[in-house]
Each structure stands twice: as C-alpha cells, then as structure tokens.
Amino acid sequence: DSGYAGPRLLAIADGMGGQAAGEVASSEVISTIVALDDDVPGSDVLTSLGHAVQRANDQLRQMVEEDPALEGMGTTLTALLWTGQRLGMVHVGDSRAYLLRDGVLTQITQDHTWVQRLVDEGRITEEEAGTHPQRSLLMRALGSGDHVEPDLSIREVRAGDRYLICSDGLSGVVSHQTMEDTLASYQGPQETVQELIQLALRGGGPDNITVIVADVLDLDTGDTLAGQLSDTPVVVGAVAENQAQMGDNGIMQTPA
C-alpha cells in the first residue's frame, strides 16, 4: 500500500499482482498524483483529477511494456482533493472513503468488485458479500488496461466533517459500526488512525493496512493551523500504516 496526506490532497493506493509488483504500482500512482497538492485546481477539479489518474495509468502500462515481469500489476486509488468549500473525489477499486458528519458514518465510494455488483443486482446480501470467496475480485483497477474509468464526484465541505480513507485491510476486518464509534470518540487524526489500525490487527487484518483520517476545521475557531488561508476550510490529516516506511514527499508505503 501507499498513502499520502498533504495540505489539500489525501490519497491511498493498494497494489496487486504479487508483492513486488503491487508495491511498484501503488507507489508509482501516488507519486504521480501528489503534484495535485501543489497545483491548486480551479473550478475544473474533476478534470484535473481525471487527467492525473490517466497519466498514472499510462505510466503503469509503459512500465509493464518495458519490464514484462510486471505484467498483471495494478492498484486501487481513492483520493480527495480540496479546493475552497468543495472537494473532488476520484475512486477506482475497493479502497474506500467515508464521511463522518454529525456522528453518522457514511461510505461515499462504491466498491468496484464482482461481489458489489452481485449486491447491486440483488443476487446476494451485504452480509453474504462480507464472506464471499470472490470478495476481492476487482472489476476496475489502474494498470489493468489502456484506459481507466474512475468514479469522479464533487462534494460540499462543512466544518466539523471527518473523512476516512482506507485500504480493505481495515474495511474488510472492522465493522462499519466500530469504525463509526472510533471516529466519533477519538479527537486527533493521528491517534484515531493508530486506534483503527490496532482494531484491524486485533481482528486478524493483514500487515499492510493503510488509513487516513482528516478533519475539516472552521477558520473562525482561531486555530493557528488556519495560517494564511482565507474563505476556505482547513483540512488537517494524518496517514498511518502498519509496518510503514516513510518515503520522500510525505508518502508512506507498506508491503502491497
């Protein structure tokens, strides 16, 4: 897994295709899109996100052409990019983004999995999906083809919102209710991500768990983190990964 938490961009990528290839894929995608954190988009934030994802996908395909041993590698990507009072979201795969607002946790991404398709078609229940033997079979991923079709959306931001982005190492092990209770109970993003990872590990989760928690602060509170910004919320985020290694540019990596 690879994760990034910057001033405006939060992103997680969960690689696949064997440990080495998965690490390459997730790291490459995050390294490609982090430029969005410095290049503040205007009103066309979704176009910026879409182009960045296609560039990342093109890079993965080129790497496979140059090194056939990487054939089959791919990665999920879930990212949030803040611009003013709104955020743009891009999503491919089965990593997830959640919003905690007024104490209620809502999943704001849709899993691109075969099992989720069965749920959507009414062929199995959500409970059956949780134990289905093919629950990890992805229908969409970066690196799986020449063209990628991400979910792109815009959301309005409110002060007090708390966002969670995680790989399936968390969401596949810890229940929705437990995640909601934890996000509502812990104050700072850093202590919250650490608690979520411990819950996943105690629940038998894998050793490559990536979690980002970010809070939207109200500028009127006088928080010093508001800094030089005006007329926009401030997002304070923390990324944590079990057995993580910190790379350059604030990028965290775990075994894919």
Image: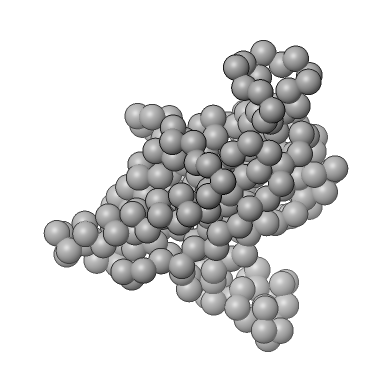
The residue sitting at 61% across, 73% down in the picture is: 116
Residues 41 and 25: in front is 41
Is 145 left or right of 67, judged from the image as shown? right
Q: Residue furthest right?
A: 102
Residues 50 and 41: in front is 41
Is 153 left or right of 137, judged from the image as shown? right
Q: Position of residue 255 (x, y in %)?
A: 38, 46
Q: Position of residue 170 (x, y in %)?
A: 60, 50
Residue 29 seen in this snapshot: yes
Name the colouring of the figure.
one colour
The residue sitting at 56% across, 59% down in the picture is: 152
Q: Position of residue 136 (x, y in %)?
A: 51, 68
The residue sitting at 35% across, 29% down in the picture is: 248
Q: Is residue 234 above or below residue 51?
A: above
Q: Is residue 92 above or below residue 234?
A: below
Residue 21 seen in this snapshot: no
